[in-house]
Amino acid sequence: MSRRKIAQSLESVTLILDSVHIRSGGGMKIAVYVVLSLVLVFGPSTSEARNEVLRFSIEEALAQQGADSRLDDSIRLFFGDQAVPAIERKLGTFTANKKTNGFNKSDMEACNWTFLAAMMSLQKRAAREGGNAVVNIQSFYRKSEFSSASEFECGAGTFVVGITMVGEVVKLAE
């Protein structure tokens, strides 16, 4: 919290205390001042909210329990600069932006779950567009590109975990 905001808050507290003092004869002033001061000093502020960008293994995320049954085997996924078979036709670049509640989950668990949801979204888009693969998949969290064949980026906040992935839907030659 900035000094200016603290000064404004203390000024507001003083005004409140003065009105309490007038109404109560001053007996409550100290107790109210102590409580309000503790709230101001130790209370959470938005400037202290957690917002970390973390990296996790693509392989581990795809190997998590339930991933096999949720992903479509007929639409292949290629990350970063992985070698891709011959492309017959490019169908467009698409984004998957997914979030989940991070409460009571480890960062890895929440990020892996969100990554899986993003891959499912890209695969569904590929199917709608007539593609059979998504290539050059990369992280695009907060519009910052991160391309890797082995890792993805995930944003972990105090309560929400988010991920943005970008990939190019293609039709691979058969």
Image (tube, grey):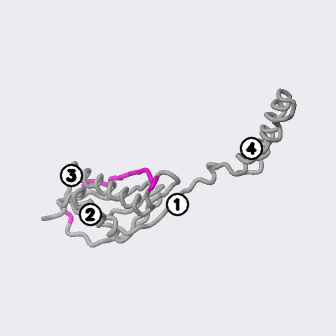
Question: Do the residues under discs 1 and 3 have CB atoms within 8 angstroms?
Answer: no
Q: Say above or below: 3 vs 75.
A: above
**Three-letter amino acid code of the residue under disc 1:** Glu
The residue wearing badge 2 is 77
User: What residue is at 30 percent from the left and 71 percent from the top?
Assistant: 82
Q: CA distance from mark 2 to mark 4?
A: 56 Å
Judge depth for marks 1 and 2 and give the one in front.
1
Report x, y in % for residue 167: 32, 58
Q: Residues within 10 Å of mark 1 (few under 14, many from 20)?
A: few
Which residue lies most toward the front here? 27
User: Disc 3 marks which amino acid?
Assistant: Ala
Residue 81 position, x and y percent, is 33, 71
The answer to whether residue 78 is visible is yes
The quadrant of the rendering that contains the C terminus is bottom left
Query: Is 116 displayed left or right of 162 in the figure?
Result: left
Label number found at residue 35:
4
Q: Which mark is residue 127?
A: 3
Question: Mark 1 or 4, which is nearer the eye?
Answer: 4
Res 150 quadrant in image: bottom left
Percent coordinates x, y for residue 96 in the rendering? 35, 52
> Is residue 93 a member of the stretch shown in magenta?
yes
Residue range in magenta is 87-104
Q: Residues within 10 Å of mark 3 (few under 14, many from 20)?
A: some
Task: Characterize the local packing of mark 4: few (<14), some (14-19) or many (20 or more) Cα atoms within 10 angstroms.
Answer: few
Q: Amino acid at mark 4?
A: Val
Precedes in sequence: disc 1 or disc 2: 1
Q: Earlier in the sequence, mark 1 or mark 4?
A: 4
Q: Identify the mark nearer the N-term, 1 or 3.
A: 1
- Residue with the mark numbered 1: 52
